[in-house]
Amino acid sequence: MNPSVSICITTHNRREELARTLQELSRLSPPAEEVLVVADGCADGTAALVQTSYPSVRLIVHERARGSIPSRNEMAGITTCEVFLSLDDDSYPIEPDFIARVSELFASRPRLAVASFPQRSDEHPVTLTIENFGPSHFAASYANSGAAIRTAAFRELGDYPPQFFHAYEEPDFALRCVCAGWQVWHESSRTIRHHFTAAQRNELRTHHRHARNELWSVFLRCPAPQVLAVAAFRLVRQLGYAWTRGWHWVLREPQWWLSCFAGLPRCLAQRQPLSWRHYLAWMKL
């Protein structure tokens, strides 16, 4: 029997975007076994919308925002399905048979932990009209705005690091998958529509969180003595990215350095280094 599939969405003050996504999900045939939504610190009527207009949705309300990562951890912990499709509040599957095809994919690949999908996104307009996204392939990461995850693998490997709050949880989890013998696969035959809403987004803030969390991941996972060289490489690469965005970004780089340093004791206390052979294989993907 093919595995059951749920849909998990976390949202923060984007009521209209969530309403559009839930309406689009109603087109899926067959539908997901269950839909879970975390209203994470919403003050815009999101919870009332879901309760009134979508009573079949399993709603979890956080009075204060905890972040997308703790919210996704919570949904992964309570879903009753064998696979959960992780979405943003502004993303949804395009093909009506998406859920059936995801179920078939996981049934055919017993060691598949994560399946990601191409996204037609307003952030990258060329993707809105491209006809061929190329061949499917193994991947080193994925995007939680459109990825299916085997529940058993997620629970076996453990939650996303809650201190990340937002960003970089996907490559960190993909790394753990590869090192544990699970597969991360990019399946190009099905697609996700991602409107990439500007509300609640801040590029500089996201860069700082991503860079900080990437370095935290190094100290959590990379073995010694390679950990120092890999950490230096990540730091320089992030500085190089900031350089491409201009001096005002470069001058603010120390903000995430300080945040990273403040969280290092927690990372070192939780440190579980992986084998260098697998770590390097993941880096080469």
Image (cartoon, helix red, strand yellow):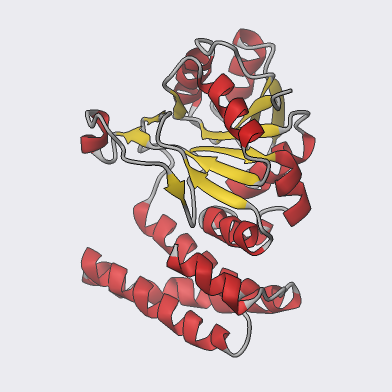
Q: Position of residue 119 (x, y in %)?
A: 37, 35
Q: From the image, which quarter does the N terminus lie in?
A: top right
Q: Position of residue 124 (x, y in %)?
A: 26, 40
Is residue 256 visible to us here?
Answer: yes
Q: Name the residue at 59% across, 51% down.
A: 183
Number of numbered callouts drawn: 0
Q: Name the residue at 43% across, 47% down.
A: 137
Q: Position of residue 127 (x, y in %)?
A: 26, 35
Q: Name the residue at 63% across, 19% down.
A: 32
Say if 282 sits above or below 21 in the image. Answer: below
Asked which quadrant contains residue 285, the reply is: bottom left
Q: Please give left or right for residue 220 compared with residue 228 in the image.
A: right
Is residue 36 visible to us here?
Answer: no
User: Of all residues shown, which one is farthest toward the bottom?
Assistant: 225
Say if 151 sits above or below 280 in the image. Answer: above
Say if 213 sits above or below 117 in the image. Answer: below
Q: Position of residue 31 (x, y in %)?
A: 60, 14
Front in this rendered view, residue 177 or 33: 177
Q: Please give left or right for residue 67 compared with residue 229 in the image.
A: right
Q: Please give left or right for residue 111 compared with residue 86 in the image.
A: right
Front in this rendered view, residue 114 or 42: 114
Say if 20 sits above or below 204 in the image. Answer: above
